[in-house]
Image: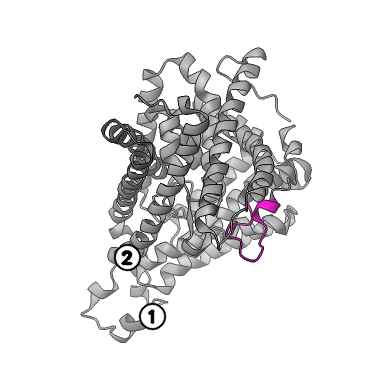
Amino acid sequence: MIQREALNPPLALLYKRREGYLWISSEGDLMIQLSYLDYIAVEKKSFLHRLSPKLKIIGMIVVLSVIVTVRNLPELLLLYVLLLTLYFTAKVPLRIFSLTLYPLIFAVLFIFLSGFQIFFILLILLKVLCGSTGVVLLLATTPYPSIFSVLGKILPSSFVIALFLTYRSIFILLTVLEDTQHALYLRGGVQWKHPWRSLINISNAFGHLIIQGIDASEKMYESMVLRGFKGKIHYRGE
Amino acid sequence: MSHIHLPDGVLPVWLWASGFIVVILIWTILLRTMKKEDLTKRLPLLGMIAAVMILGASVEIVPIAYHVNLTVISGILLGPSLIFLATFVVNTILALFGHGGITVIGLNTLTFSIEGVLGYFLFHLFWSVLKRLTPAIFLATFITLLCSTFAMIGVVSLGTSHYEELVHQERGKGIIGFEFGKEKEEHHPGQATEEKVNLRRFMAIVLPLGFIGWLLEGVITTLIARYIQRLRPDLLRLKT
C-alpha cells in the first residue's frame, strides 16, 4: 500500500533546523505528519479506529454544527474537553497533537479585527481548537480511502477521484522531494546568508517537482487505463 | 495571504453557504461544458498539480507566516477550468489539516481560483505584449495576488456585522469583555464606535505582510517558470 512506502521519509533532513538555515516547517512538517497520520489511521487499533467511517464522519458533522451554532464559552470548552478525551482514549500519539494547534497561528490575524476582546479571543480560539482537534481525530482514526469511499456516495465521482489522486500524488511527490533534497544540499541548500541563491534553489526544487509530477501523472494515467479505469474508482473497503 | 485562514463558526452562515453554492454551480457548469474523456484523462495531472500546491502551502516561511500558493503557475499549467477544480480539491485537503475551516472551503476556493484563473489570463496578456517571460510572469503573479488579497478582505468585510455581534454579545451580560491599551482607558458609554470591529486594523496587518508575500511569490513563481521554460517549454504553451 502507498501508505507504507511513505513511512518516515528522511524528508526531515530538508527541514533540519541548522544555524543559518532558512527553510522552516513550523507546523511540524505537515507533509511528514500526513504520512504519519495515514500510518496511525491504518495501524492503530482503538475503539475509535474500529468505529465505522460513516459514523465518524457524521460525528464530525455534529462537531462542526456545534462550532457553527454555539456562541457560548462553557459549551465550547465542554466540546473541546470531550474531543481531547476521545483523542487520548483513542491513543492517538502526542506527536501529531501539534497539528491541532497549527491553525492558531492564523487565528491570531483575525483577532486583530476584534479590538482584542477577551471573550471574542477565547471564542475564536476554542472554535479553532474544536475544529482542528475534530478533524485530526477523524484523520488519525480513519484511513483516507475509507473517508473518500463514504464521500463518494454523496459527492460527484469526479471530485472524489480528484481527491484520491491528489492524495496519491502527495506520496509520489514526497518520494521525488526526498531525492530533490540531496541535490538541493549539494547546491548550498537554503540559507539566510544567501537569500537570492536560496530562492533560486527553492524555486528550482519546486520546478523539478512540477516537471517530475507531470511526467508521473502521465504514467499514472496510463497504468490506470491498463487496469481498466473508466472514470470511476471502486473502493473495496479495508 | 489570499487564503482565508478562518476557523469554522466565525463567518456568518449565509456567507460561507453562499461560497459553497457558487462553487457547486461553477463546478457543475464546468463539468457540463468539459468533455468527460478530456476530464478523465487530465484528472491525474490535476491531482499532481494539486499535490504540488499542497506541498507549497505546507512550507511556511516563519517570519511573515507566509506560504507560497503556487496557484498562478498551476493555473498556467492546468488552464482556467481545471485550476478551479484543483483549488477546490486543494482547499478540501488543506481544511482536513485544519488549514482554514471546513465551512470556508467554498470561499477559499473562490479566492484561490481568482489567483489561478486571473493569473492564467494576465500571464498570457503580458506575454503577448512584452514577449518576455520574466516580467510577464512576475507582473501576472503580483497583480493576481494583490487582487485575491483584496477579494479575501472583501469576503471578511462582508461578515463585519456578524463579528460585531460575536464581540458584543457578552457585554450586555457583564461577563468578560475588557480591552487592552488605549481603548481600555477610554472606555465610556458614548464611545461605542471605538469598540467596533476594526477592518482597518485587520488590513493594516494583512496588507504589509501580503506585500512581502506577493513579492516573494512573484519571484518564486518567476524562477519556477524560468526553470520549466529551460527544461520543458511545451508545458507553458507560449505562443511566439
x then y, percent, for residue B184:
34, 83
Q: Nearer the viewer, residue A238 or B118?
A: B118
Chain under label 2? Answer: B
Quarter-of-image position of residue B179: bottom left
**Label 1, residues with CA under 10 Å away: few <14, some 14-19, many ≥20:** few
Q: Label 2 amino acid?
A: Ala
For disc 1, the marked residue is B180
The local secondary structure at tag 2 comes to: helix
**Residues packed near mark 2 inside 10 Å, few (<14), some (14 to 19) or many (20 plus):** few
Give percent across and percent down for residue B155: 32, 50
Decide: is A83 above or below A115. Answer: above
Whether residue B61 sits left or right of residue B158 in the image: it is: right
Q: Depth check: give the residue in front, A33 or A205.
A: A205
Q: Is any part of residue A153 visible from this angle? A: no
Q: Residue drawn 30% across and 36% down?
A: B122
Range covered by the magenta-colored residues: A12-29
B65 over A40 or under it: above or below: below
Q: Which mark is residue B204?
A: 2
Q: Nearer the viewer, residue B9 or A175?
A: A175
Majority secondary structure of magenta residues:
loop
Q: In this orientation, does residue A177 appear?
A: yes
Q: Which quadrant of the figure contains the C terminus of chain B?
A: top left
Which residue is found at the position 40% from the left and 42% from the top? B112
